[in-house]
Image (cartoon, helix red, strand yellow):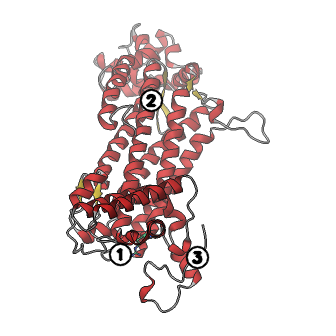
Amino acid sequence: MSDSDAAGPSLWGGRFSEPTDAFVQAFTASVGFDHRLYRHDIAGSRAHARMLARVGVLNDAECERIVEGLDAIEADIEAGRFSWSVGLEDVHMNIEQALTAAIGDTGKKLHTGRSRNDQIATDMRLYLRDAIDHLNGEFDRLGRGLLDLAARHADAVMPGFTHLQPAQPVTFGHHMLAWFEMLLRDAGRLQDCRKRVNVMPLGAAALAGTPYPIDRRITAELLGFEAIAENSLDAVSDRDFAIEFCAWAATTMTHLSRMSEELVLWTSPAFGFVELPDRFCTGSSIMPQKKNPDVPELVRGKTGRVNGHLMGLLTLMKGQPLAYNKDNQEDKEPLFDTVDTLAGSLRAFADMVPAIAIRPENMAAHARQGFATATDLADYLVRRGVAFRDAHEVVGRSVRHAIERGCDLPDLPLDELQQFSEAIEADVYEVLTLEGSVASRDHPGGTAPEQVRLAAERGRDRLTAVTGGPHAAP
Ligand code: ARG
């Protein structure tokens, strides 16, 4: 990137009597980060030129020259042949200046009937729409990975927790489906956000609209926008589409972070429930035995920056009067970083999830240690006519007895269990096993293996209904 070219960009320098201070030029420039919008900026310019030709503001030859010039600039940027100049402030003026340098005075006509204010708002929306479509594809991949994992381990029993204390047995598949539900809602929210992103600001010009006979529907159709912004002041000043996206991102990261936290716990030898393949872990430079779950740890950690970006954008907007203010230039870095962080985190999870191996023996051993079938004993007593509160008391005393004996509930001989209630008979052992416990929760939403298999099957169609399916990603 070159430092400075002109004394104040020739694109707006007319009314100035001295050049911009060199530091101010660098301080106010955005090209260092907004050059990343070049594809969307060029797409917007092409569509704008075509629309201007259709309504007769440009003639066909001028339009063709502009479009060909823009194509060549895009090819140069992609080939790394384009040199960005801080002196030209932002992506828009860099490209416009290059166009005029390449095709001559016709290039100066491109900016007719628009402003950088509606231009940047359009670029951001086009950029975010592409990002959303990419993230949607990652959701589809991750969701299918979770459904496969759930179906594969529909029978594996692990402790379900409340307060991180073993509470009741659940199947590992059921737990994976809980993750799936969180992410399916996130995928749905992302599609909802896309509708409000996919609205076209172009035509608002600086703030009030433009006196040229523009036809915004043509531009919108060329760019694939579903609607045009209805109010020019709102069109150039609104950034709530970015806030909404970042709120979505913070919610999704919060879910990924909770999943990460569980993976970190479960991979610790203290739990030993799952194993991540070596390629998703790193070692320690000092402790040779270590295998660290860096990927989930990092995803958990990155949640902080995404939450921060949401706060940043909310704060950026809260004091702005209508319409466009330069403050808005500060929306880009948080938004880009949010997109990058989500793309990386979803990709890491989508790659990692299918490779998660489980250790069913350790899960079952933990479930047994924690008296996870105690509620099943209470329910058994209730089925035999004992009031629930009394049953709770009976089970509590049975658990205390088992603790004193150093064993689990199903290890207690029948006569010892019967000391606590006459309602207990030999068939009690059927409900005290982990398998019996999970099998009894046999309704939609319950943890019975058969229900998990059915729910995983339904999940495929539910996911397709939101993401468009595995092949919908661009
Ligand atoms: N770099 C600016 C931004 O990101 C582009 C719009 C500039 N408009 C203006 N009137 N200075 O918001």
> Which image quarter holds the C terminus?
top left
Between 159 and 323, the one nearer to me in the picture: 323
Residue at the spot of label 2: 146
> Which image quarter holds the N terminus?
bottom right
**Of the residues under marks 2 and 3, which one precedes in the sequence?**
3
**Of the residues under marks 1 and 2, which one precedes in the sequence?**
2
**254, above or below 374, in the image:** below
Q: Is residue 286 visible?
A: yes
Q: Secondary structure at mark 1?
A: loop
Which of discs 2 and 3 lies nearer the camera? The answer is 3
Name which quarter of the figure residue 387 lies in. top left
Residue at the spot of label 1: 320
- The residue positioned 55% from the left and 20% from the top of the image is 360
Q: Secondary structure at mark 3?
A: loop
Q: Quadrant of ligand 1?
A: bottom left
- Residue 65, image x and y in percent? 38, 61
- The residue positioned 55% from the left and 27% from the top of the image is 355
Name which quarter of the figure residue 383 lies in. top left
Question: Which mark, residue 4?
Answer: 3
